[in-house]
Image (spheres, helix red, strand yellow):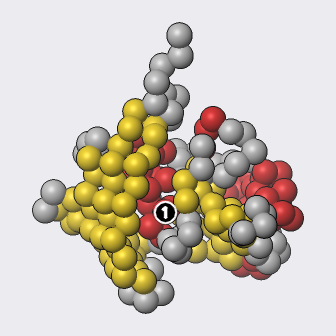
Amino acid sequence: MALPSTIYKASIQLSDIDRGVYETLQATVAKHPSETDERLVARLLAWAIFYESELAFTKGLCVADEPDIWVKGPDGRVRFWVEVGLPESDRIIKASRHAVRVALLACGRALANWDQQHLPRLAGIPNLTVVSLDQAFINTLAARLERSITWSVTITEGTVYLEVDGVTHETGIRIKTGALL
């Protein structure tokens, strides 16, 4: 018998000053039994960092040919493909051919090795944005993860400020796009 997913309720007060986005985000998110708390935190952070009104969580790990988050157009085509973690570069290249925009929140213990191995292959993809955050920031949030998540996220001048339970955590956002990879 397969283990069931764990359900989390997330409420994020988002103030993305850099993009002029001010929203209250609400979602029910399933954490697959094989998914780590760090990966769930990264998916929620990606949702906030790349937020736009139609951005939605997919079935995630359960469906290999879907990203973690996406925007689909009325015709069913993917307009915005968002990955989380350290995927194979071939997956990102394929996504860039089929989606209008592709973003990756690159995170994980092997990020430095991934950067060296995969970023050269991704260089020059014009519709790709790669964002990375400090892994210690993600680990700190994962250690405080509860089934009911209430975050206040402020993004300004390349920094994420995240308040949870009266404590503010911060990290820089490293952004690489197209030719800058």
Q: Residue furthest top?
A: 1
**Residue 91 to residue 62: above or below:** below
**For mark 1, does the 10 Å Cα neighbourhood hold few (<14), some (14 to 19), or many (20 or more) residues?**
many
- Using the rendered view, name the quadrant where residue 93 is placed: bottom right
Residue hosting label 1: 47
Residue 178 in sight in this render: yes
Q: How many marks?
A: 1
**Point 46% across, 38% down: residue:** 31
- The answer to whether residue 111 is left or right of residue 173 is right
Seen from the viewer's position, the closer of residues 171 and 5 is 5
The image shows residue 7 at horizontal and vertical percentages of 38, 38
Q: Amino acid at mark 1?
A: Trp
**Residue 15 to residue 163: above or below:** below
The image shows residue 124 at horizontal and vertical percentages of 82, 74
**Point 64% across, 65% down: residue:** 71
Instruction: For mark 1, give the secondary structure.
Output: helix
The image shows residue 4 at horizontal and vertical percentages of 46, 24
Residue 153 in sight in this render: no
**Residue 173 to residue 11: above or below:** below
Q: Residue furthest left?
A: 166
**Point 68% across, 39% down: residue:** 63
- Using the rendered view, name the quadrant where residue 167 is placed: bottom left
- The answer to whether residue 105 is left or right of residue 113 is left
**Residue 85 to residue 100: above or below:** above
Seen from the viewer's position, the closer of residues 106 and 26 is 26
**Point 46% across, 30% down: residue:** 5
